[in-house]
Image (spheres, rainbow, N blue to C red):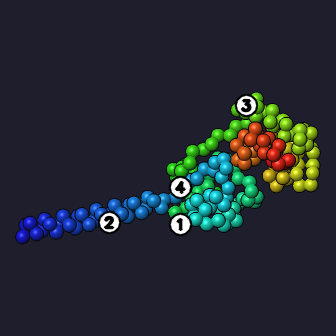
Amino acid sequence: MTLRNNVTKFAVAFMAALFFGLTLLVTVSHADQIYTVKSGDTLSGIEYKFNNDTNYNKLAKANKIKNVDFIYVGQKLLLKSDGEIKAATKKEVATVPATQSTTSTSSSSTTSSSSSAKAWIANKESGGSYTARNGQYVGKYQLSASYLNGDYSAANQEKVANLYVSSRYGSWSAAKAFWQANGWY
């Protein structure tokens, strides 16, 4: 009888441990995560990667992104365990582990070749004028007015241009190469 009780206790304990382990595995694999946008990412690519869906408009709406062609390197997106993706709050960023490392994009660390490529583009786009306009395109780098959110100051134009180029091309040199091949950037 003692052997039978011990075997029964062992079987119950084993099954409980197995159940607990599987429950933990499922819970951990579906935990909320923070995704950090990196160079080359697109909304549709992120949506497809995490939800096997290409409905990037849903992703843009959930993140309150007005221009679906414009996301920033380093931007944080919360990937909910239920498949919902929304912009991460500062509190969520602090409490949820990141799935990607942040790519640093600093305008103060531009190299001389990057600086000359930036100046070259500004000259081609606007003759270097912060007040230049061409339809919806504004300023020194001829950015869409929607990117600038009504702030046409030189400082904002520089900041937004650096973010745009970093997220779309990775560097001003790459943006210049694209411009030379296509006549725009």
Going from the N terminus, do you reach mark 2 or mark 3 first?
A: 2
Going from the N terminus, do you reach mark 4 or mark 1 first?
A: 4
- The amino acid pointed to by label 1 is Asp
State the residue at coordinates (88%, 49%). Answer: 138
Say which residue label 2 marks.
19
- The amino acid pointed to by label 4 is Gln
Foreground: 89 or 154? 154
Most extreme residue toward the top is: 112
**What is the C-alpha distance between the residues marked 4 and 1?**
11 Å
Going from the N terminus, do you reach mark 3 or mark 4 first?
A: 4
Number of numbered callouts drawn = 4
Foreground: 145 or 38? 38
Of circles 2 and 3, the one toward us is 3
Say which residue label 4 marks.
33
Of circles 1 and 3, the one toward us is 3
128 left or right of 49 in image: right
Going from the N terminus, do you reach mark 1 or mark 3 first?
A: 1
Res 178 quadrant in image: top right
Rendered location of residue 51, percent (x, y): 57, 64
| Residue 111, numbered circle | 3
